[in-house]
Image (cartoon, rainbow, N blue to C red):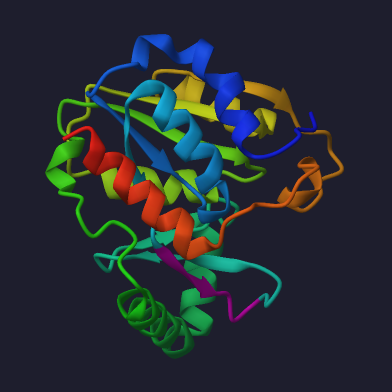
Amino acid sequence: MYYPNRQAVGDILAPKLTSFSNNETIIFCLKKSSLLSCIELAAHLHAYIYILQYSEVDDPYDITRALGAVTSVGEFVLNPEISDFEYEYIFGEFKGAVEQRKQDAFSRVNAEKDLNPKFNLAAFNNRNILMFADVLDTTFQIHVAFDVLKNYVPKSIFGAFGNITTDISDKFRREADGCTYVDVLASTLFDDSHYFEQPDPYSEDQELQMANNISLYWE
């Protein structure tokens, strides 16, 4: 599906998510590019926002893909497209390079601006979590998000998306409490911006500021 702008995704999804319309819901934004849609949805639901922060680890065996990601707390999460067997082979052949790439990724994520400066991770306990992206064609960020949540006990974990693949909807049906979405992407995928007629009117810094401010507003 195509949208006039990113805010439209939040407007379309909000009526489908009225059961999450309370101060007990955290929208877990999986991509910074989805922030404007996320802010619109959060305004409808009176929800808090948490933005996934990670750094990719390059695959020394195949430079066209990421081996995995390192989170802001230093956890390595394997790319779901790579099996444990394949990872063991790569690590055995390129151990030094893999370890160096993990260290570099951890340094990068720590050097970045904190995307959630006012957020206490303990807030994930006993709250509804809406994992969200306006356009998502891989389960990669979802795996990283599940790793962030593994030390907490949410009330529920649900997916809310604009355009996604069947793999993503299947994953939420199997491993979470379900998901809702607007459309399923065709096999031919485009850059996220392809699905929006209008460009974002705000800079990334402005969107980050709005995302953090909207969460403070509900306090």
Q: Give the residue at the far right of this rendering.
A: 188
Query: Percent x, y for residue 116?
Result: 28, 56
Question: Eyeballing the image, is 209 above or below 87?
Answer: above
Q: Which image quadrant: the C terminus?
A: top left
Q: Can residue 180 be seen from the camera position used here?
A: no
Q: Name the residue located 72 percent from the left edge and 24 percent from the top edge.
A: 183
134 or 173, which lies in front?
134
Magenta region, mostly helix, strand or loop? strand
**Left or right: residue 171 compared with residue 163:** left
In the image, residue 63 sits, relative to residue 121, either above or below, namely below
How far across and how far down the image is residue 135, in percent? Answer: 65, 40
Bounds of the magenta span? 54-61
The answer to which quarter of the image holds residue 180 is top right
Residue in view at x 53 percent, y 50 percent: 140
Locate the N terminus by quadrant. Answer: top right
Give residue 97's position: percent from left, percent from top.
Answer: 48, 88
Q: Picture quarter containing residue 72? A: bottom left
Q: Residue at x 50, y 18 (%)?
A: 14
Residue appearing at x 39%, y 18% in the figure: 177
Total count of labels: 0
Q: Is residue 185 visible?
A: yes
Instruction: Give 68 or 18, whichever is nearer the viewer.
Output: 18
Looking at the picture, how far across and down is residue 58, in whole percent? 55, 76
* Residue 176 in magenta stretch: no
Q: Is residue 69 above or below residue 108?
A: above
Residue 27 as seen in the image, left or right of residue 124: right
